[in-house]
Image (cartoon, rainbow, N blue to C red):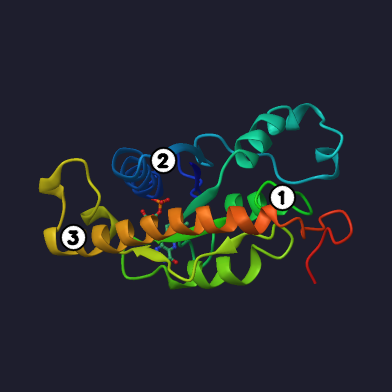
Amino acid sequence: MEIGLVVGSHRKYSQSAKVAEFCSDFLRDKLNVSTWTLDLGQDPLPFWDEELAGGESHWAGFGQLAQQLSASDAFVFVSPEWHGMVPAALKNFFLIWSGTDELAHKPALACAVSAGEGGAYVINELRTSSYKNSRLCWLPEHIIARQVHKICNADPSENDSDANIRFVERCQHSLRLLTAYARALENVRDEGFVEQTKFPNGM
Ligand SMILES: Cc1cc2nc3c(=O)[nH]c(=O)nc-3n(C[C@H](O)[C@H](O)[C@H](O)COP(=O)(O)O)c2cc1C
């Protein structure tokens, strides 16, 4: 099984990337899942434009990313809450995969990140506006990394142990569930009902 993690922060060294690394380590080391990570702060994508279809020079790396997404069985999207929103880099990511099968009918776990007590707006926004044309399937479970500076740190002395264990337990439960959905939704895709050509956009 292969799971792709997408980090939605624009910052080169973000807390979201830290949380994604924690998820990736757990998937790899405890659940025996292959992982790869697209950090949009480290490797930003061009803003969507009409030249995407023609593969113009600024979209040169696009084919490789499409292949990685296609080869993935499930996804984890880790996004900070910025001004009560999902950052533009991640919204742009969802603009790109429309009417194609890279994300379609694959399960995804949403993980919001907040330095304080926020994060709920990110979950709401992802569930509302990211799946229509990509056909991504959000898990009913989601996670929110609140007080993120106090959790998931490599040096345990930097963690608030209560906050850390609360997040870690919830996060590990959700990641286990994600692998179960990944196995189940493979059967859905194999049914042969998917009509991306006839219905490229969701209603
Ligand atoms: C432009 C900007 C806007 C932010 N707005 C919010 C917000 O609305 N709610 C919130 O909980 N945190 C907000 N934060 C703080 C983030 O929670 C904090 O930066 C955290 O580290 C997650 O972002 P990161 O993954 O980019 O590090 C904001 C940070 C930035 C840079």
Image quadrant where residue 25 sits: top left
Q: Position of residue 107 (x, y in %)?
A: 55, 58
Residue type at tag 2: Val
Q: Which mark is residue 97?
A: 1
Residue 186 placement, left or right of 84? right
Local crowd at mark 2 within 10 Å, few (<14), some, or many (≥20)?
some
x, y percentage for residue 58?
74, 30
| Residue type at the position of mark 3 | Ile
User: How far apart, in angstroms, are the residues tagged by discs 2 and 3?
Assistant: 22 Å
Q: How many marks?
A: 3
Crowdedness of circle 3 by 10 Å Cα count: few (<14), some, many (20+)? some
- Residue at the location (57% across, 69% down)? 127
Question: Residue 33 got which mark?
Answer: 2
- Give the label on residue 165, or none: 3
Q: Give percent across and percent down for residue 32.
A: 36, 39
Q: Is mark 1 within 8 Å of ligand 1?
A: no
Report the quarter where the C terminus lies: bottom right
Q: Is mark 3 within 8 Å of ligand 1?
A: no
| Discs 1, 3 touching: Cβ within 8 Å | no
